[in-house]
C-alpha cells in the first residue's frame, strides 16, 4: 500500500541538489524580493532551495522545457516563506509542473439539483490538495510584467500549500503553538470583511481585490504583500502584518524601514541602535 509519509521520508533521505555559485548568482541578486535578507539568511535560503530541488521534482508541462535556471528560480522563491519554518512544511507537494504561460484548468462541479457541470478556467498558478503545484513560467520569473498590484504566483501557490496543512484551504494554516487561534481568526476575518466592504463600495485601494474572493485567497494574497510589499500590507492592516510575521517568523518590514533611517543610526542584530 502506498504511504504518503513514507514516500516523503524516502525523498527526504536523498541528498540535496547542489547549487553552484554561478547558478545562484544568476538567480539571487536579480530578485528584489530577497533584498531584506541578511547574508546568513541568504545562505539558509540557498540551503533550503537545494533541499526543495532534491525532494520535489520540477517537471515540464506541455510545450515547455525546464532548465536548471527555471528550477532554481522557482526553488529560491518557494524557499522564502519557509525560511524559518523548514522544508518539511512542503511534504504535501508531490511535484511542480511548469507551463510556458497561462494554462487551462478543468474540473467538475455538481449543482443543488445533482447536475454535473464541466468547467474550465485560465490560470497562472494552481495548488492541488495532496498533489502538485502548477505554475506559469511567464508569471514566475523576476522579469515578469508588472501588474497593477504586487504579485508573485510562486509565493501565492505555496501559501495555499501551507494553508492546506491544516486539513483544508480555509485561510488559516497550522499555527504555531505560541500563536492565538482566536486572535488570528478575529484579525483575518475583520480585515477580509473590511476589504469586501471596500470592494462593494468601489473604494480606491492599494490592496488586490482578488483577496476578497474567499479567506484562502486573502491569506495567499496577504502573503504576497508580506514578502513583496510589506509596507502596503502594514498600512492596510498592522494586525494582519503582525499575524503573518508571527506565522512566517520573519519581519521584512524592518529592512524597508531601515532604508530611511538617519545616518547616525545603524542596524545591528535586526534592531536599530544609536551610534555612540
Image: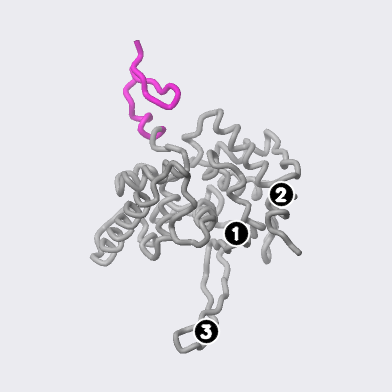
Position of 209 with respect to 13 (left or right) is left
What residue is rendered at 37% in x and 23% in y? 272
Front residue of this view, candidates 82 and 198: 82
Of 205 and 252, the residue lying toward us = 252
Residue depth check, mark 3 versus mark 2: number of the one nearer the observer: 2
Mark drawn on residue 240: none
Task: Identify the residue position indicated by label 1 in the image.
Answer: 133
Quarter of the image for the N terminus: give it.
bottom right
Q: Residue at x 70, y 49 (%)?
A: 55
> Circle 2 is placed at which residue position?
9
Position of residue 260 measured from the top left corner of the image (x, y, whole percent): 33, 29
Q: Which residue is mark 3?
A: 117
Quick check: 19 above or below 149? above
Q: Residue at x 58, y 59 (%)?
A: 135
Q: CA distance from mark 3 to mark 2?
A: 38 Å
Q: How far separated are the C-alphas under marks 3 and 1? A: 24 Å
x and y, in percent, of residue 59 in the image: 69, 58
* Cα gap from disc 2 to disc 1, whole angstroms: 19 Å
The location of residue 227, given as percent across then percent down, is 45, 44
Q: Quadrant of residue 76?
A: top right
Q: Can residue 157 be seen by looking at this rendering? A: no
Lower sequence index among marks 2 and 1: 2
Asked if residue 231 is positioned above or below residue 128 in the image, the reply reads: above
Whether the magenta-drawn stretch holds residue 214 is answered as no
Vertical order, 231 against 152 (above or below)? above
Kindly state the secondary structure of the residue where label 1 is placed: strand
Q: Nearer the viewer, mark 2 or mark 1?
A: 2
Q: Is residue 192 left or right of residue 122?
A: left
Local packing at callout 2 (Cα closer than 10 Å; few below 14, some 14-19, many 20+) is some
Q: Residue at x 41, y 48 (%)?
A: 225
Magenta extent: 255-276
Q: Is residue 259 magenta?
A: yes
Amino acid at each position: 500500500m502506498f504511504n504518503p509519509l513514507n514516500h516523503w521520508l524516502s525523498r527526504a533521505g536523498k541528498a540535496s541538489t547542489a547549487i553552484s555559485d554561478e547558478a545562484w548568482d544568476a538567480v539571487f541578486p536579480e530578485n528584489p524580493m530577497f533584498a531584506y535578507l541578511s547574508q546568513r539568511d541568504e545562505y539558509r535560503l540557498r540551503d533550503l532551495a537545494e533541499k526543495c530541488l532534491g525532494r520535489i521534482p520540477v517537471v515540464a508541462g506541455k510545450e515547455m522545457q525546464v532548465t536548471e535556471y527555471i528550477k532554481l528560480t522557482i526553488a529560491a522563491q518557494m524557499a522564502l516563506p519557509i525560511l524559518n519554518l523548514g522544508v518539511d512544511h512542503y511534504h504535501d507537494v508531490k511535484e511542480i509542473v511548469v507551463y510556458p504561460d497561462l494554462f487551462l484548468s478543468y474540473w467538475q462541479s455538481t449543482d443543488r439539483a445533482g447536475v454535473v457541470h464541466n468547467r474550465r478556467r485560465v490560470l497562472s498558478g494552481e495548488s492541488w490538495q495532496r498533489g502538485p503545484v502548477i505554475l506559469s513560467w511567464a508569471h514566475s520569473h523576476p522579469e515578469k510584467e508588472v501588474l497593477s498590484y504586487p504579485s508573485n504566483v510562486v509565493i501565492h501557490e505555496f501559501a495555499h500549500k501551507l494553508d492546506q496543512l491544516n486539513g483544508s484551504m480555509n485561510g488559516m494554516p497550522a499555527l504555531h503553538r505560541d500563536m492565538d487561534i482566536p486572535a488570528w481568526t478575529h484579525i483575518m476575518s475583520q480585515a477580509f470583511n473590511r476589504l469586501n466592504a471596500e470592494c462593494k463600495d468601489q473604494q480606491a485601494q492599494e490592496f488586490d481585490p482578488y483577496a476578497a474572493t474567499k479567506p484562502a485567497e486573502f491569506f495567499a494574497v496577504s502573503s504576497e504583500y508580506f514578502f513583496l510589499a510589506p509596507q502596503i500590507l502594514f498600512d492596510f492592516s498592522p494586525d494582519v502584518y503582525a499575524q503573518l510575521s508571527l506565522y512566517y517568523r520573519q519581519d521584512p518590514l524592518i529592512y524597508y524601514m531601515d532604508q530611511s533611517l538617519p545616518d547616525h543610526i545603524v542596524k545591528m542584530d535586526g534592531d536599530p541602535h544609536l551610534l555612540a
